[in-house]
Amino acid sequence: MKPAGMLRQVSDFSDFSRGHWLQELLCRGEEPSHVQSSPDGQHLLVLQKSRPPPLPRVVAFQRHGIGGADLERNWQSPQPALVGLLFLQSPLTWGSWVLAIVWEHGRTEVWHFVVAVGWQLLQTLELCQGARARIVSVCSQGASLVWCEERPPLDAHSDMSKCAFRFCVCSRALEVGEQGVRLGTVRIVLHNSPEYRVLASPQHIFLVPAAASFATTSKFLLVWHPKKAKLTITAPSAGFVHRKVLHSSSESDFRKLLLGSVGLLSGLAPLDIHTSAVSNSGGLLLVSTKGAVNMVEPDGTQRHVFDLEGGPLAQGSPVQLKTFGSNLACVLAGVLYLVDQNSGRLIEKKILSMKEVHFLESPGEEDSIQLLTQTGIYSFSFSKPEDSSRPELCLVEMVFEEACRYYQRRSLSSSKLTVEKLKKGGVFQAPVALAAILQHSLHPKQKPARGLQETYAKLLSTMSLELQSYMSLELLKTCVVCAPESEVESYCEELVEQEVSRVLHSDMDKDNLAYLNSVFASFPKAAWKATRSCLQLQQNGDGLLVARATPEVWKKVLGGPQQEEVGQNGVVPLFELICASFLRFKPKWLPSFVKLTQQYVSISWAYSSKEGPEGRVPLYKRALGVVARKNKRSEADDEMELELLLCSKRPKAVLQALHLLIRLKQWQRVVEVAEKFSKLSPLLNKEIFTTLLAEFAQHRELDPYLDTLWSLCPAELTASDILTVVLQHLPRSQEDPVPFSSEGNQLTVGLLKPLLQRVVQRPCVQDEMYSDALQSPIFPPPTPPREH
């Protein structure tokens, strides 16, 4: 339910000193360039840059008639322009803040206000060390000033395009004490840099490229963390984040800072920034020329908040941004947009009747915002129902809408999305944005903590783990880009292992399979190591290959999309990918791996099940297909083919291996294979013996192994069957047959005699059936004795 917005007037300027003048100034068309209220809300400063002659000026208006001397500063055209009105923290007893007025050439006036006395000038200081320096942007953080200054080249005729990196970002503490005001030492944050606009949050300084910056340097933002001396380079739209700790001034050189990332940054598009402002949560709000409002967090990540209506924004059209509580207020072309910055929903849209509206600070009122208009100051806040402050309803609605937005599930299911459905369905998207929303929604904000229901606490814990995994992966990608050449390989291996593991634990669809194909093609060695790690492949003490992968991983390896499903676009199934990796880096393990997969298939799928991998194309044939795709054939490939055929133990594969050995004339192995696999089944035994008997009839290579060969003769073969096979396979001579040949390789009756004797002497099958009856000691049996 959307809360109702309430607008109430808090001032009609009657409570301000010179309030009528302020109202006249706003009503007669002298549009102020900048309006700013003091931290305590008792003073209103108006800066007019483009007023008619004679002079631009700064005017301060006091509230509640506290009286004293007024502050009004004018300056003439030859004098450098004013670049900043800043309030800084001060430990003085007469107030907790002081006002710093900073001019373009570095001169700074420090003012403070004393009740019943008014505004007093404490001191005039020089921020810049060089006389020719020019400040282009300035901000304050705590008791320090941070600014970007231009340092023109000594040669006035220098080509300005060659002096693009003539700016410097500096920081300096402003210490206010009983003895007056003193500036601390200058701290160089960045030198030899392009022009930046500096914006301060409570903990960080954002460096936003100026509109006039070169295209090559306007592709990223910089975020400086003063306490940690850490600088973050981020291109939010491209997901690039790089962090570096600045240990010395030499590391603050802008050009040296980008050396490790210039290759990646060169391919990015320039940032599209129309307006920028800092939110109350410490993030940076960016409005693009297309009207998209995005939030960049201090860690460099970005999430989309809202899209303004009206299409592309003109360069001169002002956009004002202000955050209060969890809401974002935006004024564009006389329209006020109120948006929930957590979920991006438009809460309210108001068409304003006022020509000029300025946002003011609301001291002590976190969930309201003040607007300065020509008729007074108004406060806008939301009336909260009793249950609207609970974050659970917003979280559930946001998660459900996020899933529907990507997968069009509105019309498919009206049930609430649970954690299990979110993970099982593979619909987890935009983890950074989603986690940021959750974290912000559950932030206590100095209010009593409310206990979450079990469902939402589980959702938050799941999101936290997913985010940690995602951020570690993004950090590793950044390390790969910025690492020296000697360390790139180790980073790549770790990155590939995380990616392969991630895909193996998600749904193996065509897109994920195509992605794995590209990973294996780009990083073959790293992919091989990742495969070993994910399947936990290793040799045991007996030298046998073992795998400790989970059943879910095995099903992804064997049960993913097959060749007929992925098409002919060069993508191969995962099992073939892994076999090719074995063949390249550890060919001796490939037969053992195929044997392991067959063992798993026999446990997980029924024999010849069409749903299992063996129901379509046997695994050994798929592995043979990988071997056959090699460009060059070698003896090792023949040996690999033999091992794959024999490890399957399928009758057709064993016979194929036997024929291959015969073709290679490896007779010793022929006999060994025959002896080993004849024990598997009587039918296979008969096929093996018939094949070898046919070879025996054609040449004399098997003569040394006849004893072993005759022992394999099946019991159902008769002498007539043996002679039929021999006669069918006798070699045909080109000459007329003669009784006695001079060649010594012909078959003789003497060679067949031991086999025929063995068959003739073997009991007939029918004789065995009646052997019990025929071997009875007395026939016919004796007559039983008669009983009298």
Image (cartoon, rainbow, N blue to C red):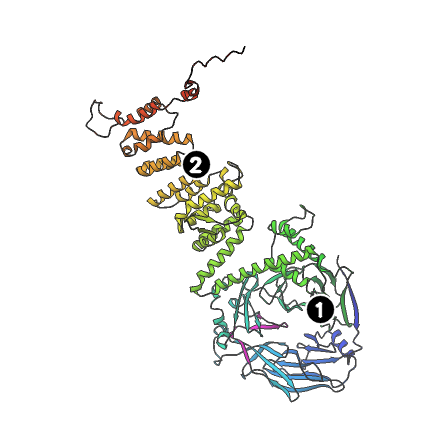
Q: Residue at x 77, y 76 (%)?
A: 23
- Residues 660 and 305: in front is 660
Quadrant (top left, top right, bottom left, bottom right) of the C terminus: top right
Stretch of the chain drawn in magenta: 186-210
Q: Earlier in the sequence, mark 2 or mark 1?
A: 1
- Picture layout, residue 105 above or below residue 718: below
For the stretch drawn in magenta, what is the main secondary structure?
A: strand
Magenta stretch encompasses residue 202: yes
Q: Position of residue 249 (x, y in %)?
A: 50, 77
For mark 1, does the 10 Å Cα neighbourhood hold few (<14), some (14 to 19), or many (20 or more) residues? few
Q: Position of residue 619 (x, y in %)?
A: 46, 41
Q: Position of residue 133 (x, y in %)?
A: 55, 81
Q: Which residue lies most toward the front here? A: 788
Please tell me in which quadrant of the rendered image residue 771 appears.
top left
Amino acid marked by disc 1 = Gln
Amino acid marked by disc 2 = Arg
Q: Which residue is mark 2?
A: 650
